[in-house]
Image (cartoon, grey):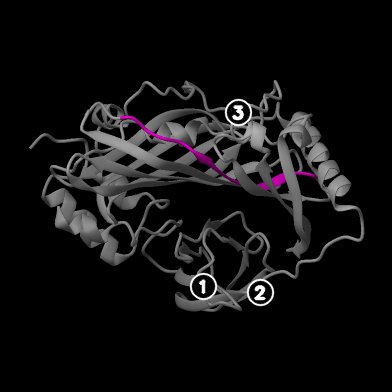
Amino acid sequence: MRKLLHLAGLMLLGTAAYGQGLVSGKVLDKQTRQPVPYASVAVLGSAAGTTSNAEGEFVLTLKGLPAKLVVSQLSYGRDTVAVAAAGALGAIALAPAPVTLPAVEMGSYTAELLRKAYRELQRSYPTKRYGQAFYRQVTYLDGTPTEVQEMLWHAKAGNAGLEGTALAQARYAEQKKALLNYKNFSYFTKEFNIYSTQGDTARKGAILSPTTTEFYTLRLVGLTQSGGQNLAEVAFVGKPAFNPQHVQGALIIDTDTYQILRFKVGIDREMRSNNPTFKFKEGRMEYEIVFRPTATGAVLDHLTTTHTVAMGRLLKPDVQLKASALAYFYDWQATPPAGLTYAAPNGKESDIAAVKQAAYDPVFWRDNPVVKRTSLEEEIIRAFEQQKSFGTMLTN
């Protein structure tokens, strides 16, 4: 299982498949030269495309060459890249969009933006979509990966988050004799929504409500233009009397359509263990949910969930525990497929129990275009399978 240590930083999300027309690249910030994570890479004149991973890397199969790729990310200008032949494209640099502040009274402008965004959520909330979600979770103890979990869900969602899932495929690997793992970490991804039909401002992330300014202090970070969109970034923090969990974050709003395109929030969240010798402290949950704009309302693109906590032990040094998950959504349709039942989030379920019940299909994981990886990653996966340590949970 030592090979697991190399896995977390290598995973690559994209619609890759080996064969003619395979291209790869890396999206960077033009000024800082740092990776731009989860940038959109679309094929001009086609519905095909992918998203860069956390390191800005992407792999994509083009059905025809030559072709043009449109690379974009919120708060950046977009770039069009001509592709004449398959192979490595190298670095694609996106210039940060200039930030300005409007010549208006900031408080009233920002509050009005959020009121309009809330009304847009109300308007388009009844529109539901049905598609697929690829979920990957990695758990770390003191920076060392100890478990990797992957699922493919059939997904039902609205303009505020996931509403139900049905498990299609799953697999799991763990480092033997790890101190602990998460029973149901995917629940935090499934249950996170930015809007409640009841306007319940006591829920985390419910900054979108009729009474936002009663509970949050707002700050307009600035206005930008990105790919023809006019965007506003608003930072928020819970007011002291309302904020024992130190809720704070930011959101990006399209100022023409008032659709929420990105929502980031952090909240204190401790965890409990059935082991009385462990004591957890300084727990923090971070969410980032990104939407793609459409004429009928925003649609989920991806959602990241990260939990960090210090685990105290009797007469031993603290251990830093971290779980990081990414859910990537694709193939959204307006009508549900026949015969599927979507389960609502359930905090009492067990991820590992679900993995055990799913028949492990190595051909699916090898050939599915959404989860295809680089050759090095494929080598690591094969090593797991040869050791019978990657698949459904095994006791040996």
Residue 202, how many percent across, how many down? 63, 26
Q: Secondary structure at mark 2?
A: loop
* Horizontal side, residue 62 vs residue 369: left or right: right
Residue position for label 1: 34
The outermost residue toward the right is: 104
Q: Please tell me whether residue 269 belongs to the stretch shown in magenta.
A: yes
Which amino acid does the dot numbered 2 rest on?
A: Ala
**Which residue is at a point 47% across and 42% down the rendered structure image?**
285
In this rendering, the answer to whether 57 lies above or below 320 is: below
Q: Main secondary structure of the magenta part?
A: strand
Residue 140, how many percent across, how many down? 29, 50
Mark yes or no: residue 263 visible: no
Which amino acid does the dot numbered 3 rest on?
A: Arg
Q: Secondary structure at mark 3?
A: loop
Q: Quadrant of residue 45?
A: bottom right
Q: Earlier in the sequence, mark 1 or mark 2?
A: 1
Cα distance between the residues tagged 1 and 3: 34 Å
Q: Quadrant of residue 126?
A: top right
In this rendering, the answer to whether 346 lies above or below 69 is: above
Cα distance between the residues tagged 1 and 2: 12 Å
Q: What range is drawn magenta here? A: 258-272
Q: Are the residues flagged by discs 3 and 2 in contact, CB closer than 8 Å?
A: no
Residue 207, how many percent across, how many down? 69, 36
Residue mark closest to the camera, 1 vs 2:
1
- Number of the label disc, if any, that sits on residue 95: 2
Which of 49 and 396 lies nearest the eye of the viewer?
396
- Number of the label disc, if any, that sits on residue 203: 3
Q: Please tell me whether residue 210 belongs to the stretch shown in magenta.
A: no
Which amino acid does the dot numbered 1 rest on?
A: Gln
Crowd tier of the residue under label 3, counting other residues whose Cα lies within 10 Å: few below 14, some 14–19, many 20 or above: few
